[in-house]
Image (spheres, helix red, strand yellow):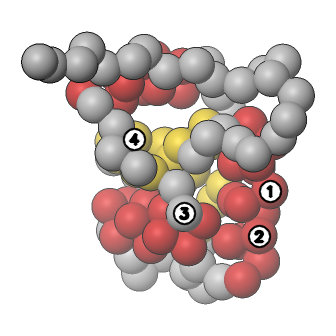
Amino acid sequence: MDLTSKQRSQLRSLANGIDTIVHIGKDGIGPNLVKQADDALEARELIKGKVLENCLLTSREAAEELAKATRSEVVQVIGTKFVLYRPTHRKDKKDRIVLAASKKRD
C-alpha cells in the first residue's frame, strides 16, 4: 500500500484526535503486542503508538517493525510517537476512513 503525500497529510490530521493505544517497552515487539495492534487496526484503521524510555528500539525502528508485522503503513513518526494505518476489511462502512483519491495523470 503506497500512500500519497495528500493521503498521509489527511491521516496525520485525523491522528491528532486519537489516543495512544500501543506502548512499546523494554520487551520490544512480541506476539501479544502485535495482536493488540492488529485488533486495534481492524477496529479503527488508524492507531497511535508510543515507544517508552526503556525500549531498545528507536521510534522509527519500532514503527517499521510493527507495521511489517501488522501489514500496515507508517504514516508518521514524531519523537517517541508514531501513527499506523491499515484499511479495514469490515463490511460495515460506518466508521471507515475515506482517503482522498490521487488525481490520475494522462
Numbered disc 2: secondary structure: helix
Where residue 80 appears, x then y in whole percent? 41, 51
Q: Residue furthest front?
A: 106
Q: Which residue is mark 3?
A: 71
- Mark 2–mark 4 Cα distance, whole angstroms, equals 20 Å
Q: CA distance from mark 3 to mark 2?
A: 12 Å
Along the polypeptide, which appears first: circle 3 or circle 1? 1
Q: Is residue 88 above or below residue 9?
A: below
Quickly name the residue at label 2: 35
**Badge 2, how many Cα within 10 Å: few under 14, some, many 20+?**
few
| Residue 62 in view (yes/no) | no
Q: Which residue is mark 1?
A: 39
User: Residue 4 at x, y = what percent?
Assistant: 28, 31
Q: Whole-percent x and y of residue 60? A: 32, 61
* For residue 48, above or below residue 99: below
**Amino acid type shown at disc 1:** Asp
Q: Mark 2 vs mark 4: which is more N-terminal?
A: 2
